[in-house]
């Protein structure tokens, strides 16, 4: 196997779509960068990485209007969000074991995408002794957007050292009244993106079973128990399993229904300022105050509210993000940016420099991919975004071992019998391969998880209908719940029966006006949820 330090020399900027994470949530980001692919040079034994521009026509941007493309796959997007460079190599010291297509081989698992879920699944499958190929245009590119997590979630996975900033508590401002301030005694942290990615990459390399190929997948076909992924440049790779880890681009998985999610939109910046009013020991989780707005902007915010999410890193450095919890269609980025600028002016912030600017568009809810199907979806591709909150990072990293172990179990089951111990650990027919994929999907989306997701979608349906006053009433009740209930809801820990208890407790904690709103606006979604539950087996 050839190893080569992966590096990309800049040619000319071009548009490239990528998947990333923001504020602890999954997000789509448009980038101007380079597409990297491997090519064998005539007369040379060494593999060289060359950069080929991706045309602007092929770029996908964060959504203003979602459109379902032909073929039943995931959404494409149209947006005026500015492009940002993504032609960087974050780890020039890391040498990736590269696959040479001139020496074709069949892998046990082909993973398309090198986000957190793709790397985590690849590492665990390879650690069990299987051969894995990761396909990605630039596996050493940085994960661009800020994302945060509840510290207890990362501690449970042994990843607490992959946080670069932590806050011992968080605060919520419902309005400008003293009683509108709620402190949350749950530590919060920002993920150290380079450290987490290095950790996952180095685990893959140390497993000795993961290879990388720098390219972009086009489509996949299945025959005789094998899946063939067609890549740019006429190259194809073959595997027993294929996992789509491309995030919300959902490149290879199939859908049988129109994809019509809600969208969490956010515009954020990391800035150096002369000073700011935030407590550096406290993370600002939600600020629904609207004193900074007036006129038409205030009226728009009253109908489609947004909140401030802020991470103070030091007395002069802070991440500020204007966020729409969920809307359909998405609130346009220029509107989010306008509202953030008005907040900053109201707070008297004098910006010295802008370190980073990000645009997040997070599809929430919507139909799941067809399951079972031959391609295994992981992470955002599999619909693991929390439909009511947009959170995903901890969920996908926590689910990765379950998905990977299910793949390992299915590959191993082929030769479980003593009489079959000499056989290759791979499906021997298309029927067997389909059954094995179905088993993995069953582990990923058991009935209890589908019930839980139906409840979360019911919650999203309610939130879509709330104006600013009603949103404040909702969160006044939400953050009055026990830690068990609100922690569990945000972290996807509650079972369906526990979610019923959560809903009843929320109703009991709500004001009379909020109860009336929940009944009036929640009843249609409740009927849909109950109908969906009847079909689950």
Image (tube, rainbow, N blue to C red):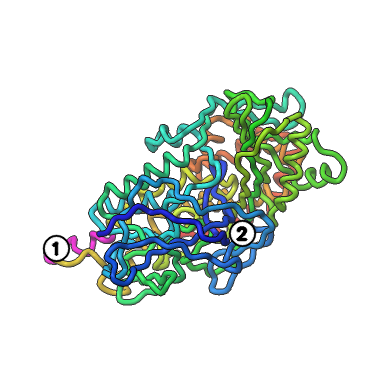
Say which residue appears at 37% left-offset and 42% top-offset.
Answer: 199
Would you place residue 279 above or below residue 286 in this image?
above
Q: Could you tell me which secondary element the residue under label 1 belongs to?
A: loop
Q: Is residue 508 visible?
A: no
Task: Report the residue at 39% width, 47% height from top.
Answer: 92
68 vs 380: above or below: below
The reply, left or right, for residue 329 in relation to residue 123 is right
Q: Give the crowd class for mark 1: few <14, some 14-19, many >=20 residues within 10 Å.
A: few
Q: Position of residue 508 (x, y in %)?
A: 65, 35
> Magenta segment, which residues?
410-420
Where residue 61 is drawn, which disc sits there?
2
In this view, the residue in front, 111 or 179, is 111
Q: Is 87 left, or right, of 351 in this rendering?
A: left
Residue 60 or 439: which is nearer the viewer? Answer: 60
* Residue drawn 57% across the image and 41% down it: 23
Quadrant of res 243: bottom left
Quarter of the picture containing the N terminus is bottom left
Relative to 434, say whether 293 is above or below.
above
Is 413 one of the magenta-colored residues?
yes
The numbered mark at residue 421 is 1
State the residue lying farthest toward the right: 295
Is any part of residue 339 visible from this angle? yes
In the rendered picture of this protein, how many numbered marks are placed on residues?
2
């Amino acid at each position: 196997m050839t190893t080569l330090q992966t590096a990309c020399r800049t040619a000319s900027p071009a548009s490239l779509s990528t998947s990333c994470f923001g504020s602890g949530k999954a997000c789509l980001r448009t980038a101007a960068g380079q597409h990297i692919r491997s090519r064998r040079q005539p007369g040379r034994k060494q593999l060289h990485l060359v950069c080929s521009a991706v045309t602007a026509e092929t770029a996908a941007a964060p959504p203003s209007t979602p459109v379902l493309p032909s073929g039943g796959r995931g959404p494409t997007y149209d947006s005026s969000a500015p492009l940002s460079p993504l032609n960087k190599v974050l780890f020039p010291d890391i040498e990736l074991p590269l696959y040479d297509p001139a020496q074709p081989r069949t892998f046990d698992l082909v993973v398309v995408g090198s986000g957190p879920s793709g790397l985590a699944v690849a590492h665990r499958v390879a650690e069990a002794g299987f051969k894995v190929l990761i396909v990605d245009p630039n596996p050493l590119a940085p994960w661009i957007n800020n994302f945060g997590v509840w510290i207890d979630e990362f501690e449970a996975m042994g990843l607490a050292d992959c946080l670069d900033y932590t806050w011992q508590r968080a605060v919520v401002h419902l309005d400008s009244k003293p009683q509108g301030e709620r402190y949350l005694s749950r530590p919060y942290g920002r993920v150290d993106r380079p450290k987490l990615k290095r950790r996952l990459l180095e685990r893959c390399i140390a497993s000795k079973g993961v290879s990388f190929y720098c390219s972009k997948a086009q489509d996949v076909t299945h025959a005789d128990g094998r899946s063939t992924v067609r890549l740019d440049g006429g190259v194809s790779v073959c595997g027993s399993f294929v996992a789509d880890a491309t995030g919300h681009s959902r490149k290879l998985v199939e859908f049988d229904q129109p994809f019509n999610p809600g969208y969490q939109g956010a515009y954020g910046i990391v800035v150096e300022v002369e000073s700011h009013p935030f407590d550096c020991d406290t993370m600002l989780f939600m600020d629904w105050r609207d004193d900074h707005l007036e006129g038409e902007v205030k009226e728009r915010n009253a109908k489609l509210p947004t909140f401030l999410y802020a991470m103070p890193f030091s007395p002069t450095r802070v991440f500020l993000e204007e966020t729409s919890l969920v809307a359909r269609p998405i609130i346009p980025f220029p509107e989010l940016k306008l509202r953030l600028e008005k907040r900053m002016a109201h707070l008297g912030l004098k910006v010295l420099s802008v370190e980073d600017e990000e645009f997040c568009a997070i599809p929430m809810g919507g139909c799941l991919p067809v399951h079972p199907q031959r391609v295994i979806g992981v992470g955002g591709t599999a619909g693991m975004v929390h439909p009511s909150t947009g959170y995903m990072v901890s969920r996908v990293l926590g689910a990765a071992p379950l998905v990977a172990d299910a793949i390992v179990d299915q590959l191993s089951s082929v030769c479980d019998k003593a009489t079959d111990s000499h056989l290759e650990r791979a499906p021997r027919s298309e029927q067997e391969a389909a059954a094995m994929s179905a088993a993995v999907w069953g582990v990923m989306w058991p009935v209890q998880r589908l019930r839980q997701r139906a409840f979360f979608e019911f919650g999203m349906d309610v939130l879509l209908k709330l104006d600013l006053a009603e949103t404040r009433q909702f969160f006044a009740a939400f953050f009055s719940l026990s830690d068990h209930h609100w922690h569990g809801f945000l972290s996807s820990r509650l079972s369906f029966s526990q979610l019923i208890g959560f809903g009843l407790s929320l109703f009991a904690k709500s004001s009379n006006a909020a109860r009336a709103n929940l009944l009036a606006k929640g009843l249609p979604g409740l009927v849909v949820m109950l109908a969906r539950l009847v079909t689950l087996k």
